Amino acid sequence: MTDRRNILVTGASRGIGRAICDTCLARGYRVVGIARQFAPEISSGPGFFPRSLDLADLDGLPAALQQIHREFPAIDTVICNAGSGRFGALEQFSAAQIKGLIDLNLTSQILLAREFIPAFKGRGHGDIIFMGSESALSGGGRGAVYAATKFGLRGLAQSLRAECAGAGVRVGIINPGMVLSAFFDQLDFRPAAEEDCHLEPKDVAEAVSLMLDARPGAAIDEINLSPQKRGIRWSKKT
């Protein structure tokens, strides 16, 4: 495997995804970033190749991923970070909202893996890292649909780990607790501001680096990453 990785990162425009991109670029890796849109100040730079794509558009996603793969055939690492959250009692969700959350948080991740795994197997190496959640470990009130997507993602990672190991392809998942990021901008709660009550995007990016730095032949299957304490701020009455 070459020292200079070619990495695809989804959800690359902000938060955890942006921190992962910055960390990888600082190491001299080439990074293809996928997001629905990019701010002008981060839309270009040495080694960074942004591509606008809505992963929730499942009808067009397979062809779009094939095009990106053709454009960047050297991609050897895929970090499936994109996702969104919606919380509330199950009966508060419409059928469309349930489908939308599953499409983005789970189905699009399956399609991403399906696109790149054959090439990784053919080369005899490659890394896929999924961004799970503490909700993949334990369900909680107001989070049934979100937890279902993350439990599914964890099962996907575990199954692909077993399926791909013989071909030299490593598959892992990171399960962060609450990260102080734009993820909560449209929600009615967020982690407390105290530094020991939340994670920062760079904490998750460091966990990604830890997985990627494992020597060939060794694999870190799963990382559960949490703030030292738990604290929540409510932005409005619920």
Image: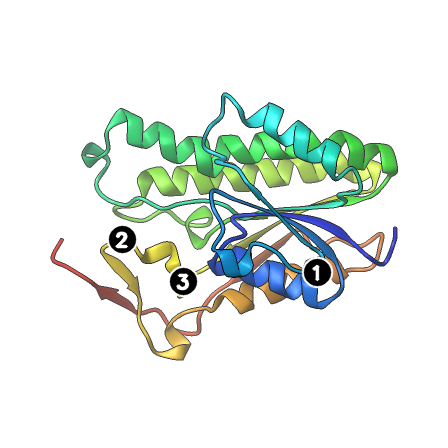
- Residues under numbered marks 2 and 1 in contact, where contact means CB atoms less than 8 Å apart: no
Q: Nearer the viewer, mark 2 or mark 1?
A: 1
Q: Quadrant of residue 28 in the image?
A: bottom right
List the residue tagged with mark 2: 187
Query: Would you name the residue on which mark 3 appears?
Result: 181
Residue 185: percent from the left, percent from the top?
31, 57
Q: Nearest to the eye among marks 1 and 3: give it.
A: 1
Compare residues 97 and 27 and report the one nearer the observer.
27
Is residue 198 left or right of 153 when viewed as pictured? left
Dot 3 lies on which element?
loop
Please give the name of the residue rendered at 54% of the width and 59% of the height, measured from the top-left corner.
Answer: 42
Numbered disc 1: secondary structure: loop
Residue at mark 2 to residue at mark 1: CA–CA distance: 34 Å
- Cα separation, mark 1 vs mark 3, equals 25 Å
Q: Amino acid at mark 3?
A: Ser
Foreground pick, 213 / 164 = 213
Residue with the mark numbered 1:
46
Q: Position of residue 74 (x, y in %)?
A: 80, 42
Q: Are marks 2 and 3 in contact (CB under 8 Å)?
A: no
User: Which residue is more in the foreground, 183 or 139?
Assistant: 183
Vertical relation: 237 (above or below) 98 = below
Relative height, residue 17 to residue 153 (above, below): below
Nearer-N-terminus badge (1/3): 1
Q: Determine the residue located farthest toward the top in the rendered image.
A: 59
